[in-house]
Amino acid sequence: MVFGQIVIGPPGSGKTTYCNGMSQFLSLIGRKVAVVNLDPANDALPYECAVNIEELIKLEVVMSECSLGPNGGLLHCMEYLEKNIDWLEDKLKPLSKDHYFLFDFPGQVELFFNHDSTKKVLMKLTKSLNLRLTAVQLIDSILCSDPGNYVSALLLSLSTMLHMELPHINVLSKIDLIGNYGKLAFGLDFYTDVQDLSYLQQYLNQDPRSVKYRKLTNELCSVVEDYGLVKSVGNLVKLIDKSNGYIFAGIDASVVEYSKISVLFTVAAVQEKYMKDEEIED
């Protein structure tokens, strides 16, 4: 049984930085980690790459030969990967004996909520390699500073979760910069726990662009709340291990690993470290 994470999120949300940091952290607590770059546009990798899709296909070549733009080129690359899944399976099989996988995906959101190639690639890998994966979706914390953008991010997360059909964890990224984005309407725990979204309505109504779509926004908030699936978390490694089953596969080894995780930030601790009191509205 093999375990890992697929790291997704919009462009600029910090996926590659996350993979770099997470691979270093997991290595420090004793896991063998293989980072798999499946973003054909990512040619500046800060981590040591075990498998790189650019050995199979490059976005710039696709755009040139097929007369496609960046978005169409990425869709083509994923479709090409699906047709050549044997190439990826052959690369991963030698590593699957003792490695934990981190898959670094492109940032194009269409790949994860209305396009099937990425989903089919993961389904095939899951069956052929007996993979147990968790989707980690990064959400730029700047979106918390604008209620409309925050609701949009929640809806995108929910759509992705339902389409991908994998254990799914949302992570607020770039939290160290949240103090630069302006005041938040509520404390950080409101956004990480996705609490009663009706409280956002008064702030949405202050934006003249949102008044016209007030009823639609109310219904979208209701959809997110009715599913009750969207949350963003801080105590990450243990939650991911629980969601994909790693924590249950080798309980003794897991206990040793977790004993090495000495610093765990609660939401309150993160808020105290990175946010000043005046950055939260009364």
Image: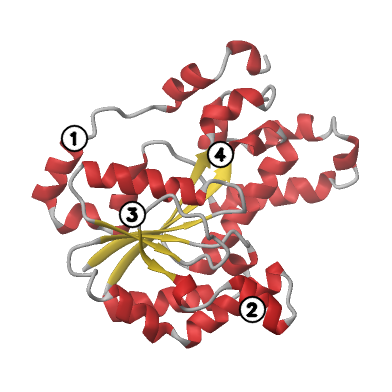
Quadrant of the rendering where the N terminus is positioned = bottom left
Residue position marked by numbered label 4 in the rendering:
194
- The alpha-carbon separation of the residues under discs 3 and 2 comes to 36 Å
* Foreground pick, 143 / 221: 143
Residue position marked by numbered label 1 in the rendering:
260
Q: Are marks 1 and 3 in contact (CB under 8 Å)?
A: no
- Is label 2 or label 1 in front? 2
- SS class, disc 4: loop
Identify the image's colour scheme: rainbow, by chain, secondary structure or one colour.
Answer: secondary structure
Q: Quadrant of residue 191?
A: top right
Residue position marked by numbered label 2 in the rendering:
62
Q: Residues within 10 Å of mark 2 (few under 14, many from 20)?
A: some
Label 3 sits on what residue type? Ser
Q: Is residue 271 left or right of residue 278?
A: left
User: Where does residue 176 sit, x and y in percent of width and height?
Assistant: 52, 28
Label 4 sits on what residue type? Val
Residue farthest left in this picture: 252
- The alpha-carbon separation of the residues under discs 1 and 4 comes to 30 Å
Disc on the earlier residue, 3 or 2: 2
Q: Is residue 280 left or right of residue 168?
A: right
- SS class, disc 1: loop
User: Height in image: 193 above or below 114?
Assistant: above
Residue position marked by numbered label 3 in the rendering:
243
The residue positioned 48% from the left and 17% from the top of the image is 272
User: Where does residue 212 sit, x and y in percent of width and height?
Assistant: 91, 45
- SS class, disc 3: helix
